[in-house]
Amino acid sequence: MITLTDKALEVVRGYMDSGDGEFTALRIGISGGTPLAPDFELTLVGPDDIRESEQEVDVGELTIVVQEEYVPRLEGATVDFVQRVNESGFEVSLAKTAKLPTLDGPLAERVKTV
């Protein structure tokens, strides 16, 4: 389950309401970073934008869509909207128990045997 703080939910709903009904869900994607500190991308999408490879996660007042491969990583994650002196925006915090991706291939095998 993904949790949105009250502030994050308020900001997302504000953007959705200003879209005159064209947005129906929040997409959370991973767009780089590292396995321990991925970069997240949050996008509002309409019903025609939801991909077959995405899973819908109902969080009460809002639907979130996530690529199926990322669902285990986002289990227990919290989305917040933060306002700091030099920045503001959404921040995704992974749960300490989130499932990290596994590494496969020749290099991973060499690392495992050291």
Image: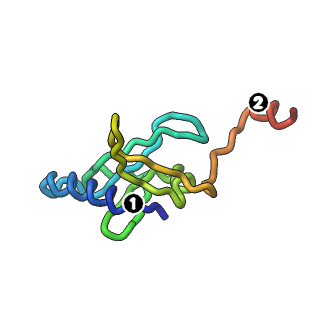
Residue that numbered label 2 is attached to:
106
Question: Residue 69, which numbered label?
Answer: none
Q: Residue at x 33, y 54 (%)?
A: 26
Q: Which scheme is used to colour this image of the protein?
A: rainbow
Q: Are marks 1 and 2 in contact (CB under 8 Å)?
A: no
Residue that numbered label 1 is attached to:
4
Label 2 crowd (10 A; few <14 / some 14-19 / many >=20): few
The foreground one among 20 and 76 is: 76
Q: Is residue 65 left or right of residue 110?
A: left
Q: Amino acid at mark 1?
A: Leu
Camera sees residue 86: yes
Q: Residue at x 87, y 35 (%)?
A: 113
Label 1 crowd (10 A; few <14 / some 14-19 / many >=20): some
Residue 99: x %, y % from top left: 63, 53
Q: Is residue 98 left or right of residue 41?
A: right
Q: Earlier in the sequence, mark 1 or mark 2?
A: 1
Element carrying mark 1: strand
Q: Residue at x 63, y 57 (%)?
A: 97
Residue 89: x %, y % from top left: 34, 43
Q: Residue furthest right?
A: 114
Position above or below: 59 against 49: below
Q: Amino acid at mark 2?
A: Pro
How far is disc 1 from disc 2 in space, using C-alphas?
39 Å
Residue 101: x %, y % from top left: 63, 45
Element carrying mark 2: helix
The foreground one among 72 and 48 is: 72
Residue 27: x %, y % from top left: 36, 50
Of tags 1 and 2, which is closer to the observer? 1
Position above or below: 22 against 41: below
